Every structure is written in C-alpha cells, then in structure tokens.
Image (cartoon, helix red, strand yellow):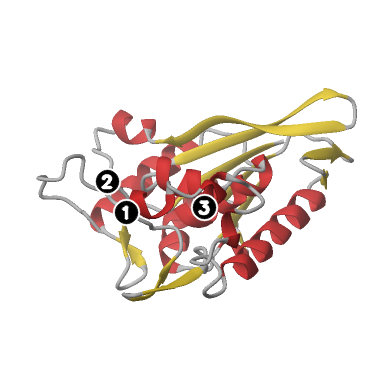
Amino acid sequence: MKIIIARHAEPDYIHDTITEKGKKEAALLAKRLSQIKIDEIYVSPLGRAKDTAAYTLQATGMQAQELDWLHEFKGKILTPKGIVSCWDRLPEKWTAKDEYYDFESWYTTPQMRTLNVKKEYDYVCGKTDRFLAQHGYERDGRLYRAVQPNRKTIVLFCHFAVECVILSRIFSLSPMILWHNFVALPSSVTTIVTEERRKGTAQFRCLGFGDVSHLYAGGEEPSFAARFCECYDDDTRHD
C-alpha cells in the first residue's frame, strides 16, 4: 500500500484558504496527482487543505472523505509568551534535552506537560493506527501485521505538523526531529509505501519527503512558508 501525504498549498492563514500563488501550486499538484492511479482521497476539515484538494478532485473526478484528525496538530504548550504550538521551538530550547530525541519520552519534559501535547499526540496516533488497520495493516509493536496486504494508493491532504505526527507514529520516531529538522513546503508530496519482506509482516518506508518537483516542472518557485531565515541577517522569518 502506498500513502501520499500532500501538504496544502501556500496558506492564507487569516482566511483559512490558499493564496493566489497557492492556487498555482494546487493546480500543479493536481496535474501531478491526476497522472497516478489513486484509489482513495482523504482531506483535513480546514479550508486551506480542502481548497488545495479541490483542484485534484476536479482533475480526477474523485470525491474526498473528510477526517477530523487530519486537522492541523492541536498540541499546545504554555510559555512566557503565552500559549503556543508545541512544534515551533527554538533550537537551543529543545536540542539540549535528550528526551526530545526519544520516541517514547519527547512529550515528558516539563515544557511539553504544561498543556495538552500528549493527549493530542495520542489521539492522532490512535486514529492513525485505526486508519491503517481499516486498510489492512494492524500495528504490532513497531511493525505492522499485513492482515489484508494490498496495492492501493491513498492520498491525504493535510498539514505539516500533523503530517509529522503521522510519520512519527508509523516510523516510531520523535516528531520533534521531523518538525524541526525537516520541512514539507506548501503543496509538497511525501510518499510512503509498505514493504512485506516476510509474509504477514510489513513496515513502511519513505520514498520521498516534501517533494516539490511538480512546482519546478511548472516553473513555479516553492513558497518560503514554514521555513526560517537561512542567515540571521536575512530579511526573512526569524520567529
């Protein structure tokens, strides 16, 4: 089974939609995805994801099922600046703690325990497990039992932070590493596939993370959204 995770195109967060540039990105993404035999499409309930998916749905003639848990990750922490999302931490704030690199203890730090991080993480992980089980792969430790192995291709339209949580669960990897050391730019495509090297036992493998080749093919520069300044004196995002 192959799962394609498509991040929404360049966002207009204020209006929960996509920008004019985002519309170009979504159209190029649709052109790419329409060339693939897709079996099922799922989408976040948020407008920017649905507006991105709309281009692919029109191009393929398919319909998407809305899944609440594909909503942007809701984990929050309390800081001196107030309540903020847990996935946007300064490097010096998290890299010094070994717990953040561990799949089973990253959420146990005093900072992560201030509000709802573990609750929201467990919720998305549980939904991910159930979703995969419904599609033939049941979680068994850190692997999956291939109860009904298949060659379906499934597309999820969602958001960067929740994408990292899903991958964190599937790969038994701390999401802190994915949130802070990787980036899936707007309209990017992440592809994972099952490998059943022994009958009945499967693992997922990443074929590509945050791929934006469809943008380059269409002459569209990738958005800077989700990135931070390359150098401190750059006139780009610092926080």
Quadrant in which the N terminus appears: top right
Looking at the rendered structure, the kind of residue marked 1 is Glu
Of residues 124 and 83, the one nearer the viewer is 83
* Disc 1 element: loop
Marks 2 and 1 in Cβ contact (< 8 Å):
yes
Q: Which residue is mark 3?
A: 57
x then y, percent, for residue 130:
77, 57
Report, in whole angstroms, how far the alpha carbon at label 2 lies from the one at label 1. Answer: 6 Å
Quick check: can you spot residue 39?
no
Looking at the rendered structure, the kind of residue marked 3 is Leu
In the picture, measured across the screen, residue 7 lies left or right of residue 219, that is: right
Looking at the rendered structure, the kind of residue marked 2 is Ser
In the picture, measured across the screen, residue 1 lies left or right of residue 97, that is: right
Q: Which residue is mark 1?
A: 10
In the picture, measured across the screen, residue 51 lies left or right of residue 103, that is: left
Q: Which residue is mark 2?
A: 223
Quarter of the image holding residue 117?
bottom right
x then y, percent, for residue 32:
45, 35
x then y, percent, for residue 134:
81, 53
Checking the image for residue 238, the label placed there is none
Q: Residue at x 68, y 57 (%)?
A: 125
Q: Earlier in the sequence, mark 3 or mark 1?
A: 1
* Disc 3 element: helix
Of residues 170 and 39, the one nearer the viewer is 170
Of residues 46 and 218, the one nearer the viewer is 46
Quarter of the image holding residue 105?
bottom right
Quadrant in which the C terminus appears: bottom left
Q: Earlier in the sequence, mark 2 or mark 1?
A: 1
Q: Residue at x 29, y 72 (%)?
A: 14
Report, in whole angstroms, how far the alpha carbon at label 3 lies from the one at label 2. Answer: 23 Å
Name the residue furthest top. 197
